[in-house]
Amino acid sequence: MKLQILPNWCKKLGLILFFSFFVLTGFEEFRAGWYSVEDSSPYKPVNQTQAEYKPYKVSEIMNNIGIHYFEMLGIIGMLIYMLSKERIEDDYIHKLRYESYLFSSIFWLVIAIIAYSFNENLKLSIDYFIYLFIWTYLITFFIKKRIY
């Protein structure tokens, strides 16, 4: 069974989506690190000398939600790139796609099992694994395509 693959021009669209949203989220997280107070509660101190806490503003909460959607659009951009056809699409490229996907899947399943066996309370969001899976697939496909 062959998977319907997006046309070749979608590679450019996927790269533009990924890099634009990747840069935006990276810049926003970098900028937020300079003036935000890291705290596990939904409240932040008004200033360091007072024991009084003030809730986050609605704009700050919406900003965090926006970053999440920007990260998701970056992942979708990489997925579009990953599912786009090569210029010359033949059975050999399908075999390389399959082998790269198989390697990435098994590799990250083993990593997840090992991470869980050492620390069952590991709290990572799924986007870490998605990004790493897609990057592993793309790097493996690129290397296999250049070697063979």
Image (tube, grey):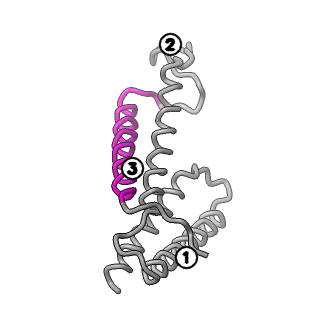
Q: Residues within 10 Å of mark 2 (few under 14, many from 20)?
A: few
Pair 3/2: label in front: 3
Which residue is at 66% across, 53% downward? 121
* Rendered residue at 48%/78% (across/down): 94
Closer to the camera, 137 or 94? 94
Counting other residues with Cα less than 10 Å from the Cα at mark 1, is it few (<14), some (14-19), or many (20 or more)?
few
How far from the left and from the top, in percent, is residue 38? Answer: 48, 32
Location of residue 51 in the rendering, given as x and y in whole percent from the top left corner: 55, 15
Q: The residue tagged with tag 1: helix, strand or loop?
A: helix
Q: Residue furthest left?
A: 146
Q: Secondary structure at mark 3?
A: helix
Q: Which residue is mark 1?
A: 102
What numbered label is drawn on residue 50? 2
| Label 2 or label 1, whichever comes before in sequence order | 2
Name the image quarter holding the N terminus: bottom right
What range is drawn magenta here?
9-37
Which of the labelled discs sits on residue 5, or is there none? none
Residue 97 to residue 24: above or below:
below
Q: Measured along the vertical axis of the image, is residue 14 above or below residue 37?
A: below
